[in-house]
Image: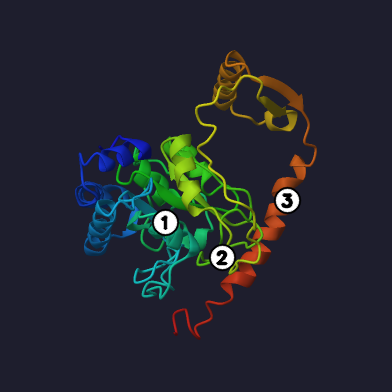
Amino acid sequence: MIDASLSELSSALAQKRISSVELTRLFLDRAQRLNPLLNAFITLDCDTSLSQAREADVRRERGEAQPLTGIPVALKDIFCAKGWLTTCGSKILSNFVSPYDAHVVERLRAAGAINLGKTNMDEFAMGSSSETSFYGPVKNPWDPTVVPGGSSGGSACAVAARMAPAALGTDTGGSIRQPAAMCGISGLKPTYGLVSRYGMVAFASSLDQGGPMARSAGDLALILNAIAGFDPRDSTCIDRPGEDYTRLLNEPLAGLRIGLPKEYFSTGLASDVGRVVAAAIDQYTKLGCKVIDISLPQTRLAVPAYYVLAPAEASSNLARFDGVRYGYRA
């Protein structure tokens, strides 16, 4: 079961080959066994997770199951979850128990998913190695001597090590995509505004987005179906009709146009990365895609712009931890 996709787990639950309680206990047991080695989780609350699993089993018996009902999902510890510690990897919030759920947590719970636990991360998401957490560094499950990437390294590690079938992360400048790549899983930063940021502790508000991390594009689509949607509590959230992100997964790729920005293949690209990308391009071509050379000249401005915007917004957002309500003196 630990190698099953989300759709396979959903089918197993629907066919009563396993219950949500059994599935949740399976992943909790594995997480408790491996976490001392990998440090992917900051918080595990077995009683709460199993209580949610029992509710999911009852919901299924009533005929109210959705695709994610009864499936455990880990949460990066930057998302507020009612009754759970929400530390952002920081000593400052080491005793903060959230009084409410983030919008994405609300939506996952509405879909019947189980909160498996809160995953480790770079402190306040400001890092790319998951080494800056107050709770210790996260290890890469493929080789504990190297980093898993960051800042959502705990979520990436948990999924790659089969401690969780899927997880949520956040991405400001690569914090879902980079650890997903470094841990050999799939990760998606949704279009800005597609997923509400309500209840997600802010780093750089004009860049932050929550998104799914799992082992396949199909699993990402199932999670995105659950968490995307309008939320009036986030003024940047897009008000548009929902859609099924799984609808094109089995469609042929013939005729799909793929642009290759020449700026992405400039001096400095690692040779092994270049070879893998070239192999992917060749495979897409064989599948009937049309590969087009394009130019994105503004690419050279991306990193300088990021290093102006992100620290400025972080300075503003982190100023709230002033010791009045949150911080060492609070």
x, y percentage for residue 303? 70, 48
Coloring scheme of the render?
A: rainbow
The answer to whether the residue labelled 3 contacts the one labelled 1, judged by CB atoms less than 8 Å apart, is no
Is residue 151 visible in this depiction of the protein?
Answer: no
Quarter of the image where one finds residue 121: bottom left
Q: Earlier in the sequence, mark 1 or mark 2?
A: 1
| Image x and y of residue 269, in percent | 63, 30
Q: Please identify, in this view, whether the residue under mark 1 or under mark 2 is nearer the observer.
A: 1
Q: Tag 1, which secondary structure?
A: helix
Query: How many discs mark residues in the rendered view?
Result: 3
**For the point 56% across and 62% down, which residue is it?**
197
Q: Which quadrant of the figure contains the N terminus?
A: top left
Q: Using the image, tell me which numbered label, if any, was put on residue 108.
A: 1
Name the N-terminal-most of marks 3 and 1. Answer: 1
> What whole-number distance in Å separates the C-alpha atoms at marks 3 and 1?
36 Å
Q: Secondary structure at mark 3?
A: helix
Whether residue 210 is visible: yes
Inspect the image, locate mark 3, and give the three-letter code of the amino acid beneath it: Pro
State the image coordinates of residue 123 (x, y, percent, origin top left): 47, 62
Type of amino acid at the residue the image marks with label 2: Ala
Which residue occupies the foreground of this view, 200 or 128? 200
Residue at the top extreme, as displayed: 286
Residue 304: assigned label: 3
Circle 2 residue: 202
Percent x, y for residue 157?
37, 45
Dot 2, crowdedness within 10 Å: few (<14), some or many (≥20)?
many
- At 44% from the left and 80% from the top, the residue drawn is 328
Q: Is residue 95 above or below residue 284?
A: below
Contact between labelled residues 3 and 2, with CB atoms less than 8 Å apart: no
